Amino acid sequence: MATGVIGTNDQTVTTAAAFIPELWSDEVIASYRKNLVIANLVTRIGHKGKKGDTINIPTPVRGSATAKGENSLVKIQGDTHGNTALSIDKHYEYSVLIEDMAEVQALSSLRRFYTEDAGYALATQVDLDLFNEAANLNGGSGSTGASGWNKAQVFDSSGVLSDWDNAGVGNAIALSAGGDNAIRGMIEKLDLADVPQDGRAFVLTPRQYTDMLGIARYTEQAFIGDGNAIKTGKVGMIYGIEVYVTNAMGTTQAVTGSVVHDIGLLLHKDAMALVEQLGVRSQTQYMQQYLGDLYTADTIYGVGEMRDIAGFAFVTDR
């Protein structure tokens, strides 16, 4: 006769804990934050509303100082700010069904895998949407297709910038071929546009970063910094600008031939905005028809350009 001893197939407090919603939620949020790269380099705005909402973000235009004469009135700056209408139109989810048999056999390890994967998948999608939005910067058309990225920049070995031209085999060269002149030429473009020094960042593909390591000046300690990658994806600094690497970036291709080109970004945080209506939500429900637990993580957000001249994409050859 049974004596009340818990058997190996009974769910204990320890095994049940693996499916407590709070545990899933905390772990997914931690993974999501850990894997975001581009999203941490733009303006982030929280919004309480619903999918489909449109919010208006003011984009002030720089004013000018006025000489103050004795006994004269102050000159009030004109209301010349622009406006960015940004739609909360993106809703992505990650769902997994864990059947009872798997639940009994590998609860803890399964939970860790899926919470990490859910956070990674959602973070990668957010970064990808921001990357595609960058096709609007610098007066771009916003197109990311075969004829897109029309205002992305390329450089020559002297550091002179020009628009990406995908006619024929394209006009891009490798980052290492442009060398230090290319890096300084891109920085100068933001300087001439009066973009603040603080808040700038380079975002590179892994291949572009490897190519940058071939630029002697970059590998000097004064440019790399102390090597402490505090922020996600940060791999160093060059000329006081933080350098990040991420796989959440696309490529482009010239019309003629099969050469694939990498696309990187140089941007200031005011270049684009990420508006989050729902950061990351986690839900669990037992599905009797499947004899398992359905776990879903989702997020609702919108992305948009804020200041067109505060950043640009650049195309490099491989």
Image (spheres, grey):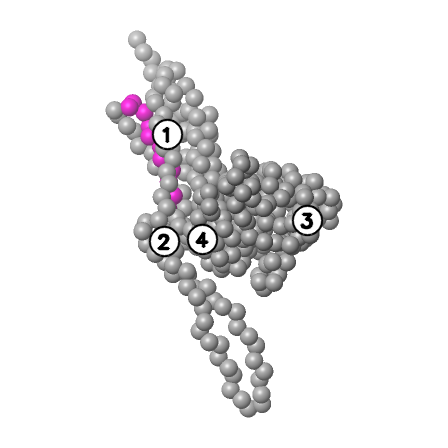
Q: In the shown orientation, is residue 14 left or right of residue 314?
A: left
Q: Quadrant of the N terminus?
A: top left
Task: Examine the structure image and report whether residue 212 is included in the region drawn in magenta.
Answer: no
x and y, in percent, of residue 38 in the image: 51, 47
Disc 3 residue type (three-letter): Ser
Disc sitting over residue 157 in the figure? 3
Question: Which of the two discs, 1 and 2, sits closer to the camera?
Answer: 2
Q: Name above or below for residue 141 compared with residue 27.
A: below
Counting residues from the start of the chain, the first of labels 4 and 3 encountered is 4
Q: In the shown orientation, is residue 45 left or right of residue 71?
A: left
Residue at image coords 33%, 16%: 4
Tell me where the magenta segment starts and ends, as one range: 290-300
Q: Name above or below for residue 206 compared with residue 270.
A: above
Question: Which of the two discs, 4 and 2, sits closer to the camera?
Answer: 4
Q: Secondary structure at mark 3?
A: loop
User: Mark 2 — residue?
Assistant: 87
Question: Which of the two discs, 1 and 4, sits closer to the camera?
Answer: 4
Between 96 and 75, the one lying in front of the other is: 75
Counting residues from the start of the chain, the first of labels 2 and 3 encountered is 2
User: Mark 4 — residue?
Assistant: 141
Q: In the shown orientation, is residue 15 left or right of residue 34?
A: left
Counting residues from the start of the chain, the first of labels 1 and 2 encountered is 2
User: Mark 1 — residue?
Assistant: 96
